[in-house]
Image: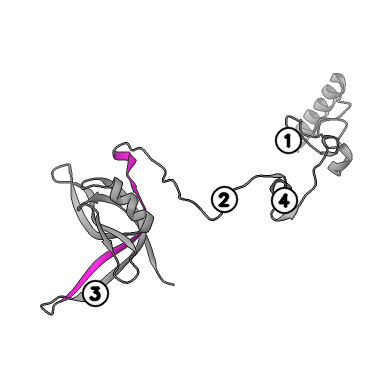
Amino acid sequence: MFDTYVTVVGNVLTAPEWRVTQKTKTRVAHFKIASTARRMDRETGQWVDGNALRVRVTCWRNLAEGVAACVMTGDPVIVTGRLYTRDWVDPEGNHRVQYELEAVAVGHDLSRGQGTFKRTRAGNLATGGVEDATSDAQIGGEATDPVTPGDTTAGFGDAPQAVPEDDYGYEPPSAPLGRPEDPLAEEDLETALGELDGDRALASSR
């Protein structure tokens, strides 16, 4: 419920090692990764190594096969998985703690190189994708009927449908807002300005 999932970017320290569980005979591979921070040394003006994290990565089943075939010591990798600590007591009676990262996905850091992906072919599966008339007629498990081209509301390349004016909910104005349809004549404008100047002169004389 409270698993901690993290993503670690670093370099492979040890080559993947194959293991098989004793009870279930499950395939598992593990390797160590080191993630070292980089910081600027203000005294020298150069980049130097900062804090480092070293963790053991565990890969199960198909992921273990892919890691064992593609990952080698020194590779820059990106690992995502569940981080936890494993506690045990060594033969000398000392209490030991180790960080482990149970990987969900492992990939190469392509910002530092190039890679080629080869998809793993699945074996003979119990079920497979089969396309026939019955499967084409069902969408989401529900049977459907075809629609004739004349009954469709839209098709490929159709232009957007124009919205009728009545659907806007208002009547477009006959003239642009803020501009009267019958502007003042030039002589009327001069008369109005003259009256305004007379009012100003009368007000200043009082």
Question: Percent position (x, y) of residue 56?
Answer: 25, 60
Question: Percent position (x, y) of residue 15?
Answer: 21, 52
Residue under pointer 2: 128
Q: Which residues are magenta?
A: 95-112
Q: CA distance from mark 2 to mark 4?
A: 17 Å
In this rendering, which labeled residue sits more in front, label 3 or label 1? 3
Comparing 188 with 19, the one in front is 19
Asked whether the residues under the numbered discs 3 and 1 touch, taking CB atoms below 8 Å apart as contact, a structural biologist would say no
In the rendered image, the vertical position of residue 43 relative to residue 93, given as above or below = above
Amino acid at circle 1: Ser
Secondary structure under badge 4? strand
Mark 2 vs mark 3: which is more N-terminal? 3
Q: Main secondary structure of the magenta part?
A: strand
Q: CA distance from mark 3 to mark 1?
A: 97 Å
Amino acid at circle 2: Gly
Comparing 194 with 15, the one in front is 15
In this rendering, which labeled residue sits more in front, label 4 or label 1? 4
